[in-house]
Amino acid sequence: TAPLDWQEEDLLNLVHNGNNVFGSFEYEGIVQITDKSLVKCYSPYHVHAIAEAMNIVASQTDIHIPRVQKAVVTPEGIGLIVMDFIQGAKQLGEVWRDMSWWQKLKVALTLREYMDSLRKIQYPHSNRIGNPFNMPRDPIEGLQFGDLSGRRTPRAGSRKQKLASYFLSYRSHRTLSVKPLPNSLFDTLVFTHNDLNMRNILVDENGTLWIVDWDWAGFLPPWFEYYAARSAAIKDMEEEDWYETVPLFLQPFPEVDAWMHQCGFHIQPSPYVWRNVESKH
């Protein structure tokens, strides 16, 4: 078992000398510090909220996620979460094309169990949107906000009516000829990963599925998970059968798809994906 009593000075030395997996140390970098542990870097304002969200998932569900060992803010103001390193794991996108139809169906059924389990999480103040541990002024993030994400999105801890009002203003910004989304789509809040893409689903050496990157997780309307996953598949230019698999493990909301389309919101593949599409396919 990896140690839980990391000393801050030793931890910083390990981070600076570790194997950089992704990004930079100062900005959402991921560094493997031992054969069983890695560190992800965060804003000092968000690190504890994300760690607590992961702990809730670990304690209330059977979803395989990396165990949080420690969350700390350095004197330099960098948030660090030490978590378990998943041995031999690959991103789902790396192995999807080589899977049989049966293996892909098994992935979908496992993810469906995971999502059903996630929706049953209970926590005080779960009638407020976003991560319940975040600072009240932190904006909600996600692909659902599209190219209007630069506007003042609803804040963590806001009432769900605030979210409905935001999307009403989204409509007003586009065209008043489109009917607003029904309020019923905002009546229920469920715990949501909110960034479920093929990079954030890992497959280990035993075929076990792991869900990582809980940065945007929180209590949100059920359709948020579905719309984010489908949008990510388009944005990342994933295999078409993955896009078609999403409704097998997440409840479809065609009315939201249609509404977003009528408002003129279209997800575009990211420039990074365009630059790498040839090597990927």
Image (cartoon, rainbow, N blue to C red):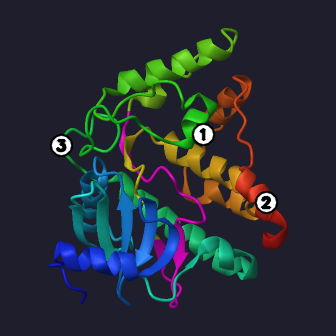
- Residue at 37 percent across and 22 percent down: it is 161
Q: Earlier in the sequence, mark 2 or mark 1?
A: 1
Closer-to-camera residue (277/145): 277
Q: Can residue 183 be seen in this view?
A: no
How far is mark 3 from mark 1, CA to CA? 27 Å
Residue projecting furthest to the top: 176
Determine which quarter of the picture holds residue 146: top right
Which amino acid is tagged 1? Phe
Callout 3: few (<14), some (14-19), or many (20+) C-alpha neighbours within 10 Å? Answer: few
Q: Which of marks 3 and 1 is in front?
A: 3
Determine which quarter of the picture holds residue 70: bottom left
Give x and y (percent) for residue 152. Answer: 45, 24
- Residue at 74 percent across and 43 percent down: it is 268
Which amino acid is tagged 3? Pro
Q: What element carries label 3?
A: loop
Q: Is residue 118 magenta?
A: no
Give x and y (percent) for residue 142. Answer: 51, 42
Q: Which dot marks residue 253? A: 1
Q: Earlier in the sequence, mark 3 or mark 1?
A: 3
Left or right: where does residue 84 sit relative to residue 21? left
How far is mark 2 from mark 1, CA to CA? 31 Å
On screen, 187 above or below 102?
Answer: above
Left or right: where does residue 84 sit relative to residue 252? left
For disc 3, the marked residue is 124
Chain part drawn in magenta: 188-210
Callout 1: few (<14), some (14-19), or many (20+) C-alpha neighbours within 10 Å? Answer: some
